[in-house]
Image: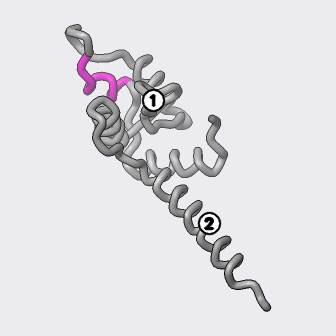
């Protein structure tokens, strides 16, 4: 599923507002898994942004002059969502998804109200 231009603009604005961090720096903060020493690679972080991990995507974007970037709050949301996916607890919903769901519910409610309030 491809994101619309508006969704990408919202994502980039959120990353910029939260303080963009290069993926190499994000990678240095993420310990390697499966018993390995060190940290994950920057390529792994880009994969998390582009393709996701265990069905969860890291919020990130390409910024002119900086390359791929994410933010510390985005990494925290990603980590919480991965934990929720692994543990079966309630998933963390990103603000963008919450707003999209709210707009859809409001439109559905308006449609129902319009249907019920037909002139006689």
- Assign a secondary structure to mark 1: loop
Q: Is residue 42 magenta?
A: no
User: Counting other residues with Cα less than 10 Å from the Cα at mark 2, is it few (<14), some (14-19), or many (20 or more)?
Assistant: few
- Assign a secondary structure to mark 2: helix
In this picture, residue 99 sits left or right of residue 119: left
Image quarter where the N terminus lies is top right
The residue closer to the viewer here, 29 or 91, is 91
- Give the magenta range: 24-32
Q: Relative to residue 119, is residue 8 depicted above or below?
A: above
State the separation of the CA atoms marked 1 and 2: 27 Å
Q: Main secondary structure of the magenta part?
A: helix
Q: Relative to residue 107, is residue 31 depicted above or below?
A: above
Tags 1 and 2 in contact by the CB under 8 Å rule?
no
Q: Mark 1 points at which residue?
A: 55
Q: Which residue is drawn at 25% across and 11% down?
A: 34
Residue sitting farthest toward the right: 120
Query: Of callouts 1 and 2, which one flags the residue occurring earlier in the amino acid sequence?
Result: 1
In this picture, residue 17 sits left or right of residue 116: left
Q: Which residue is drawn at 59% across and 48% down?
A: 7
Chosen colour scheme:
one colour
In this picture, residue 24 sits left or right of residue 7: left
What percent of the width, then of the height, locates residue 115? 71, 76
Residue sitting farthest toward the top: 36
Q: Mark 2 points at which residue?
A: 108
């Amino acid at each position: 599923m491809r994101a619309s231009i508006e969704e990408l603009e919202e994502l980039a604005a959120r990353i910029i507002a939260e303080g963009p961090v290069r993926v190499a720096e994000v990678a240095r903060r993420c310990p390697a898994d499966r018993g390995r020493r060190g940290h994950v690679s920057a390529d792994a972080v880009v994969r998390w942004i582009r393709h996701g991990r265990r069905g969860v995507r890291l919020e990130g974007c390409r910024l002119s002059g900086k390359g791929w970037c994410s933010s510390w709050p985005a990494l925290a949301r990603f980590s919480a969502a991965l934990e929720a996916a692994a543990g079966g607890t309630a998933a963390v919903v990103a603000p963008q998804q919450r707003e999209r769901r709210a707009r859809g519910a409001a439109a559905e409610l308006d449609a129902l109200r319009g249907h019920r309030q037909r002139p006689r």
